[in-house]
Amino acid sequence: MKIGRVSYQGRVRMVLVDEASSKVSFVGGSFAQHLNPVQAVIERRMTAAELKPLIEGEAGFADVSFLAPVSVPVRNIFAVGKNYTEHASEFDKSGFNATSGAAAIPAFPQIFTKATTSLAGPRDDIRFDPAHTSSVDYEGEIGVVIGAECRNVSKADALGKVFGFVALNDVTARDLQKNHAQWFLGKSLDTFCPLGPWISTADESPIASLKVQTWVNGELRQTGVLADLIFDVPTLIATLSKAMTLLPGDIIATGTPVGVGIGFTPPKFLHDGDLVRVAVTGLGELNNRVRTL
């Protein structure tokens, strides 16, 4: 099942997505007026078979505008730093690592969070004030959406707690990330978490098939496959759930592959007018224009 939210004829609607035919089907019933319908589906662990009797028509991709699959308020947005080997090395060499002297390849998952107000849609602008940050960077990623409450889950059982996967851009102000040592501020500016355009359930998106790619103004910058993570998805879920209860709708951004802006000499930061495209196999694309305030 591929599920999302769209704007259509002035209304926000939850939809089931048929990527192959580039069509969406509108889900009605009680979900027609729900403020966060996709979150409700995740919490209720509903299936496509349960939603199909509620279908009220369809439309083509060209006739709708995809929104972030979930709306504010959202559940926690967890993220993992330095989780691809080559990216860990490029970050360590970039000069933006506030923990100089630490091993380039982490021994344990590097977990941080993004403010939920950083959420943006798949075609929303990425906005920032150049007086506040002068080194905004992209990080194309694959997000894991938790589907069931879990605490102290084992790695063997972890994938059973996954609802699905979603494309995500962990946009980062590198100067703020470095200056404040803790990464939260540099990762949490408004619009710094484009998400979507839909969530694909785990049965339709096997981990071995998931590849993320990032382009800036048409130039391919990043390519990575989820199977190449230093700390795989079961390890991330097990690690987080040892410390806290994970709840349906929580999102784990699994890390970004090599090729971010700080990996170039000189760095290739984002500027007003740039177009950042992030595509993940079976999860659609983010296409976000950069706009300075």
Image: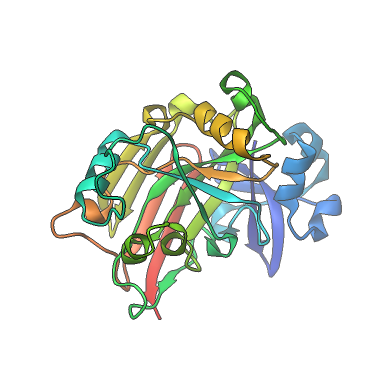
Give the camera-side residue of 52 and 273.
273
Indicate whether 51 appears above or below 182: above
Q: Give the position of the N terminus as an image quadrant.
A: top right
Is residue 82 toward the left or the right of residue 153 in the image? left
The reply to whether residue 153 is in sight is yes
Is residue 5 toward the left or the right of residue 214 in the image? right
- Farthest residue toward the top? 156
Location of residue 186 in the rendering, given as x and y in whole percent from the top left corner: 41, 63
In the figure, residue 87 lies in which quadrant?
top left
Location of residue 208 in the rendering, given as x and y in whole percent from the top left corner: 45, 25
The reply to whether residue 206 is in sight is no
Is residue 19 toward the left or the right of residue 264 in the image? right
Q: Give the position of the C terminus as an image quadrant.
A: bottom left
Residue that appears at 47% across and 59% down: 184
Residue that appears at 32% across and 72% down: 273
Q: How is the image coloured?
A: rainbow
Indicate whether 128 appears above or below 116: below
- Farthest residue toward the front? 101
Task: Report the label total.
Answer: 0
Location of residue 45 in the rendering, given as x and y in whole percent from the top left corner: 76, 36
- Farthest residue toward the left? 265
Give the camera-side residue of 274 and 176.
176
Give the camera-side residue of 96 and 53.
96
Location of residue 257 in the rendering, given as x and y in whole percent from the top left corner: 33, 41
Residue that appears at 21% across and 52% down: 94
